[in-house]
């Protein structure tokens, strides 16, 4: 019987799971609700049961499972296969992911990695960065996360490399506070939340006459999508917000590129749904702040895998020989 493997992208609401062959082709995928009750103690047993159910449903031989890869929030101990500090899951203690899965699949490789890193690996394996050995991947959602691949290998440093959202790019006194305790992190400016905060700030301090400004003045809620849509319609405030947020993002990306010299910078997450319009604001600042020799061969891309990036990247951990 053919060998197979699983990739799991564990989130605070749901876990996405994929069944793959050895070529990382998705054979099936589904979701399992993340049960965070009782300090998250049901999460791993529920995932194990989901795998057992799928193995039975597909009439697979458990001995033919070569591995399980999982992307998780929290602090990852790759050597031990453990997670700690995933507080949105209730995991304030060490969770031994590898040991739990290997009780059921004793001959399978079990690998655990940070959730943003597995998305980066997914885009490298099958997405916008396929074929590139040097990649900076940045996900723009509620926060800003990322993963960096150098010479074909995920950059982890002492364990937490790739926390690109907490690069400080605004040192002004009125810079936004970040949840990490610093001020002016790119997460406070270019995330979905940061873009809204920038709109609110400019609406208060500027003199804009536009539908978006009127909407904010009447205390109506806006989203990053609302702001980008306004900018696309030549709304003065919308254009100012997008210009400022993407200017700072361009600066932070140029700094990442100066350190890692990537072939590709790939942007994903909900904010990246603004598409090429967004890239057109980022590239001039990115290019202007790059060391000249780094510009050649560098491209700025939109992620292509969407929600599949995490499960593909997680599955690729099983095939990594590092």
Image (tube, rainbow, N blue to C red):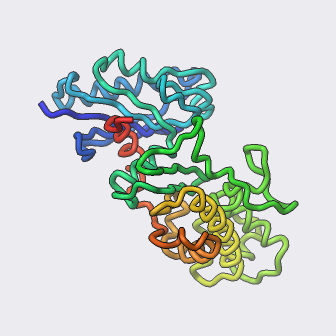
Give how far across and how far down residue 214 sits, in percent.
74, 76
Which residue is at the far front?
293
Tell me if residue 97 comes above or below residue 131 in the rendering: above
Residue at horizontal 59 percent and vertical 57 percent from the top: 259
Q: Quadrant of the N terminus?
A: top left
| Near-viewer residue (79 or 56) | 79
Q: Is residue 69 left or right of residue 222?
A: left
Q: Tell me if residue 229 can be seen.
A: no
* Residue at 71%, 72% in the rendered image: 215
Q: Kindly identify the residue that appears in the image at 42 percent across and 18 percent down.
A: 99
Above or below, 170 against 71 in this view is below
Would residue 23 be seen by someone viewing this image from the given angle? yes
Q: Position of residue 104 (x, y in %)?
A: 32, 17
Q: Position of residue 310 (x, y in %)?
A: 42, 45
Seen from the viewer's position, the closer of residues 204 and 302 is 302
**Image quadrant where residue 190 sits:** bottom right
């Amino acid at each position: 019987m053919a060998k197979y493997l699983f990739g799991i992208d564990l989130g605070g609401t749901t876990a996405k799971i994929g069944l793959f062959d050895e070529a990382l082709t998705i054979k099936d995928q589904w979701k399992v609700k993340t049960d965070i009750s009782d300090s998250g103690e049901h999460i791993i047993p529920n995932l194990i049961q989901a795998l057992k159910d799928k193995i039975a449903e597909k009439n697979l031989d458990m001995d033919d499972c070569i591995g399980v890869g999982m992307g998780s929030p929290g602090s990852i101990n790759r050597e031990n296969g453990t997670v700690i500090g995933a507080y949105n899951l209730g995991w304030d203690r060490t969770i031994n992911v590898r040991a739990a899965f290997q009780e059921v699949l004793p001959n399978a490789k079990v690998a655990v990695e940070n959730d943003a890193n597995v998305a980066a690996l997914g885009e490298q394996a099958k997405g916008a960065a396929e074929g590139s050995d040097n990649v900076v991947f940045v996900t723009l959602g509620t926060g800003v996360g990322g993963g960096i691949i150098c010479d074909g290998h995920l950059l982890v440093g002492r364990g937490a490399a790739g926390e690109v959202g907490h690069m400080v790019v605004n040192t002004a006194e009125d810079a936004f506070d970040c949840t990490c305790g610093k001020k002016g992190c790119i997460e406070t400016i270019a995330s979905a939340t940061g873009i809204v905060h920038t709109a609110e700030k400019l609406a208060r301090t500027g003199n804009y006459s536009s539908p978006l400004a009127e909407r904010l003045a009447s205390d109506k809620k806006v989203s990053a999508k609302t702001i980008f849509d306004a900018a696309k319609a030549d709304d003065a405030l919308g254009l100012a917000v997008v210009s400022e947020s993407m200017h700072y993002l361009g600066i932070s990306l140029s700094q990442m590129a100066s350190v890692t010299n990537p072939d590709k910078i790939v942007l994903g997450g909900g904010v990246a749904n603004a598409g090429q319009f967004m890239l057109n604001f980022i590239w001039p600042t990115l290019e202007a702040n790059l060391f000249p020799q780094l510009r050649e061969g560098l491209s700025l891309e939109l992620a292509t895998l969407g929600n599949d990036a995490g499960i593909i990247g997680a599955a690729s951990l099983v095939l990594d020989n590092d």
